[in-house]
Image: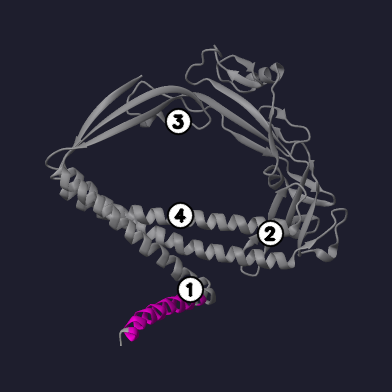
């Protein structure tokens, strides 16, 4: 089911929107420049914290707690034993032997999708044809139908939320680890519900609909084979982990985040038996990946910011659509050029602030390379001149 809507935006309205875009563009530009600068500092501080930790960490036997290591950065690994049983105390579902239990609730809802096509008109106005379509789908996230373009596709409020239930703690030998940290490492596996458990849930949660068990899930519906908007299905997943490794500060018999000299919290975890050097190498690799992802995101943001600022030129030129297309292509190219100039410059300035010796070495090397190339070019140019003489 779908419907089509045609809207026309006048040239003056587009001009007003372009002026607003300029303001948004400057805000985005400033925010992304700050983000790039902050990211370099974050990356360097994390790198130094990990280097410091790698030089201090002590691998200890998990069989006993040595009071002499209290406050030190330690590495432990071994079999994991959850303390207690994770349980959804509202619905009465538990997972014996697991490190955590997740309640996952889905609701049958209306979903709106749209597809737009915009055509420029002589005089600078735009005509946009948008087709909205609606379909029903099981969704874990609640979809706000109040924002739908067409009425008559109303979603009720989700009557029960998702929830996680990790054990309070787990042990590795004589050491105690926070249950949330352990549950995050576990392998997720479904917890099939029985008809008795589903019926008990139906008595606990009053949804006004009969409950049945389908594929290990509790389905609240008058007709599970033909679900209606607002129907609910609930499933559970358990987190199981046999062995794990951790790096952190020894506090009594517990392992908690370690505060490095530059103020960073250091707490590493991995599933399985992993030695300390491998855990620090993985953390450094993760830091590098995060740094590049933020760099790329910041550069994209700067490009969008410049594109927003320059977009008013394209709107003005759109009085004649053909000219407007040429101007828009030009402003996009300019935005890209400015991004490639400003983005790396911000990163370079950040390096001077956070890595002055490395930055100076790179600059000196660059100057030396440029000077060498210039010297060689002059030498090649002088050789023919001497030959002619």
Report which residue position mark 3 lands on: 143
Residues at marks 4 and 1, CA–CA distance in whole angstroms: 20 Å
| SS for dot 1 | helix
Foreground pick, 78 / 163:
78
Q: Judge by depth and name the residue closer to the eye, 339 or 223.
A: 339
Q: Mark 3 or mark 4, which has the lower sequence index?
A: 3
Closer to the camera: disc 3 or disc 1? 1
| In contact (CB < 8 Å): disc 2 and disc 1 | no
The residue furthest left is: 123
Q: Is residue 377 magenta?
A: yes
* Magenta-tinted stretch: 361-387
Q: CA distance from mark 2 to mark 3?
A: 41 Å
Residue 10 is labelled as none
Location of residue 292 with respect to 101 vertically, above or below: below
In the displayed structure image, the side of residue 49 where residue 71 appears, left or right: right
- Disc 3 vs disc 4: Cβ atoms closer than 8 Å? no
Across and down, in percent, residue 167 comes to: 73, 41
| Magenta residues, dominant SS class | helix
Image quadrant containing the C terminus: bottom left
């Amino acid at each position: 089911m779908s419907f089509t809507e045609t809207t026309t935006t006048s040239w003056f309205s587009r001009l007003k929107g372009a002026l607003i875009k300029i303001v948004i563009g400057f805000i985005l530009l400033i925010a992304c420049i700050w983000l790039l600068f902050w990211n370099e500092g974050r990356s360097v501080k994390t790198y130094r914290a990990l280097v410091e930790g790698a030089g201090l960490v002590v691998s200890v036997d998990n069989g006993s707690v040595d009071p002499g290591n209290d406050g030190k950065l330690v590495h432990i690994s071994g079999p994991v034993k959850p303390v207690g049983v994770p349980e959804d105390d509202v619905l009465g579902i538990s997972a014996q032997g697991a490190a955590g239990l997740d309640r996952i609730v889905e609701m049958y809802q209306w979903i709106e999708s749209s597809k737009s096509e915009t055509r420029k008109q002589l005089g600078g106005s735009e005509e946009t044809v948008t087709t909205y379509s609606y379909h029903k789908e099981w969704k874990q996230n609640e979809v706000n139908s109040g924002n739908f373009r067409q009425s008559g596709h109303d979603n009720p409020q989700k009557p029960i939320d998702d929830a996680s239930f990790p054990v309070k703690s787990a042990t590795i030998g004589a050491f105690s680890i926070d249950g949330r940290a352990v549950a995050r490492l576990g392998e997720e596996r479904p917890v099939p519900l029985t008809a008795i458990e589903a019926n008990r849930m139906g008595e606990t949660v009053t949804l006004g609909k009969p409950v049945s068990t389908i594929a290990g899930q509790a389905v609240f519906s008058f007709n599970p084979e033909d679900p209606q908007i607002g129907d609910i299905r609930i499933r559970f997943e358990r987190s199981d982990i046999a062995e794990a490794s951790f790096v952190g500060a020894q506090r009594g018999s517990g392992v908690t985040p370690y505060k490095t000299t530059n103020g960073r919290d250091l707490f590493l975890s991995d599933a399985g038996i992993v030695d300390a050097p491998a855990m620090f190498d993985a953390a450094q690799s993760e830091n590098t990946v995060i740094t590049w992802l933020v760099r790329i995101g910041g550069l994209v943001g700067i490009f969008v910011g410049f594109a927003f600022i320059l977009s008013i030129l394209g709107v003005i030129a759109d009085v004649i659509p053909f000219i407007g297309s040429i101007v828009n292509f030009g402003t996009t190219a300019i935005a890209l050029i400015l991004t490639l100039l400003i983005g790396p410059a911000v990163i370079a300035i950040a390096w001077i602030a956070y890595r002055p010796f490395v930055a100076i070495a790179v600059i000196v090397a660059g100057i030396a390379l440029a000077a060498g190339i210039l010297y060689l070019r002059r030498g090649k140019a002088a050789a023919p001149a001497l030959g002619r003489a």
